[in-house]
């Protein structure tokens, strides 16, 4: 591990030198690439230098203790320093193990979130709206931007489905654990008898693909223009600006009618299509890597029930890690950090376990 850390520190210093060169500054693509790499290496190098500082203190105090001849007061002080530096080295070593774990290359990317109502009819659609609100409020707390890409609203204010983009540094690293089936248990607004109903909503989280990540061949695309439609005629664009993009090789279809501009709708639809196709390619690559272990937390199978929101009991339970919190109102208002932090911790622990085996 120390040899690997030494190499990382050398690379860190080299990048800093390269960033000072005029030819690097004038090449914006290279400059951005080096800055991204520097950002990823910085926490590792800072922790490694902290480790080296504690190791130097440990070695120095050990030499003094081994040499003997110290008066009692000075020996007690050196002994305390020796024990403290030993504890600091152990702590730093564990933290470095976590920092050196293989990093998800998508963690810094923006995300596209797709929410679809499942079992439960109108109540599922209403809960899809509740989840969209929850994620939007969480993004706002983080200072991230939310933009609706496409939506299929219902008469009562729910969503049969809604896709939206969240832009912000590290958005994917926080949202990737949300993929899966979310179950809600509550008395529906549409239920006059006060009976509790169980409904489900499916959430998919995709890292936003850039053009450099996946290039679309225009010959593979069928693009149709049609007139927008919506619930009850409200806020419906009456011009023929809605876009339907069909990816011919896969049969995948993406529609976008949120904007009044044909070009904006096309850009949004292509953004979603590119991200979906990239996810498929990455899933294929993952499956082809022999012996690769998948985390128990992972990024979530969309067919797997991952969480239950029980309104009568005021609780939210994440089934992957056995976490139950009795703060449903705060969570539905975007207070998701406690759940997400617990999922990240469990995911990290599983990866550390796999590394040690």
Image: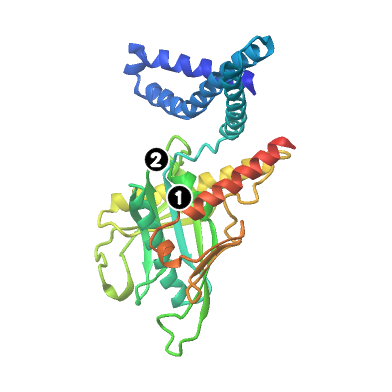
Give left or right: position of 89 versus 211: right
Count of marks, rendered view: 2
Q: Is residue 208 above or below residue 319?
A: above
Quadrant where the image shows the N terminus: top right
Q: Quadrant of residue 331?
A: bottom left
Q: Is residue 219 above or below residue 98?
A: below
Q: Is residue 224 visible?
A: no
Question: Tag 1's secondary structure?
Answer: helix
Q: Residue furthest front?
A: 72
Disc ID at residue 132: none
Residue 321: x and y, percent? 61, 56
Question: Tag 2's secondary structure?
Answer: loop
Residue 312: x and y, percent? 49, 77
Q: Is residue 203 above or below residue 186?
A: above
Colour mode of the rendering:
rainbow
Residue at 48 percent across and 54 percent down: it is 338
Residue at 63 percent across and 44 percent down: it is 349
Nearer the N terminus, badge 2 or badge 1? 2
Q: Is residue 339 visible?
A: yes
Residue at 31 percent across and 65 percent down: it is 228
Residue 238: x and y, percent? 24, 66
In 3D space, how far apart are the residues under numbered discs 2 and 1 (Cα atoms)?
22 Å
Density class for disc 2 (Cα within 10 Å; few <14, some 14-19, many ≥20) is: some
Give left or right: position of 139 versus 47: left
Quadrant where the image shows the C terminus: top right
Which one is nearer the viewer's eye here, 26 or 317? 317
Which one is nearer the viewer's eye here, 344 or 204? 344
Instruction: Report which residue position mark 1 lands on.
Output: 273
Residue at 45 percent across and 61 percent down: it is 115
Residue 254: x and y, percent? 43, 56
Instruction: Report which residue position mark 2 lands on.
Output: 169
């Amino acid at each position: 591990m120390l040899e690997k850390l030494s190499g990382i520190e050398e690379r860190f210093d080299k990048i800093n030198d390269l960033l000072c060169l005029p030819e690097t500054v004038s090449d914006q693509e290279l400059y951005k690439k080096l800055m991204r790499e520097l950002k990823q290496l910085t926490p590792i190098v800072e922790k490694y230098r902290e480790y080296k500082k504690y190791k130097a203190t440990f070695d120095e105090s050990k030499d003094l203790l081994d040499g003997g001849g110290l008066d009692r007061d000075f020996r007690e002080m050196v002994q305390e320093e020796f024990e403290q530096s030993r504890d600091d080295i152990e702590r730093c070593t564990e933290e470095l193990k976590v920092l050196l774990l293989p990093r998800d290359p998508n963690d810094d990317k923006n995300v596209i979130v797709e929410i679809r109502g499942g079992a439960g009819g109108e109540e599922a659609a209403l809960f899809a709206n509740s989840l969209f609100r929850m994620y939007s409020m969480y993004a706002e707390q983080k200072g991230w931007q939310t933009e609706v890409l496409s939506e299929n609203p219902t008469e009562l204010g729910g969503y049969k489905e809604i896709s939206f983009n969240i832009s912000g540094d590290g958005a994917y690293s926080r949202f990737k654990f949300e993929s899966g089936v979310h179950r809600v248990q509550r008395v529906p607004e549409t239920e006059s008898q006060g009976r509790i109903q169980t409904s489900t909503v499916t959430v998919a989280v995709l890292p936003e693909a850039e053009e450099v990540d996946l290039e679309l061949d225009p010959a593979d695309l069928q693009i149709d223009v049609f007139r927008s439609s919506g619930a009850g005629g409200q806020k419906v664009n009456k011009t023929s600006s809605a876009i339907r993009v069909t990816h011919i090789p896969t049969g995948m279809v993406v529609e976008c009618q949120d904007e009044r501009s044909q070009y904006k709708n096309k850009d949004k639809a292509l953004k979603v299509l590119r991200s979906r196709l990239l996810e498929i390619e990455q899933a294929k690559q993952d499956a082809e890597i022999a012996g690769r272990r998948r985390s128990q937390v992972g990024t979530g199978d969309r067919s797997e029930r991952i969480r239950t929101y029980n309104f009568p009991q005021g609780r939210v339970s994440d089934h992957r890690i056995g976490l139950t919190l009795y703060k449903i109102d705060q969570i539905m208002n975007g207070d998701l950090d406690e759940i997400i932090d617990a999922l990240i911790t469990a995911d990290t622990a599983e990866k550390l376990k796999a590394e040690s085996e």
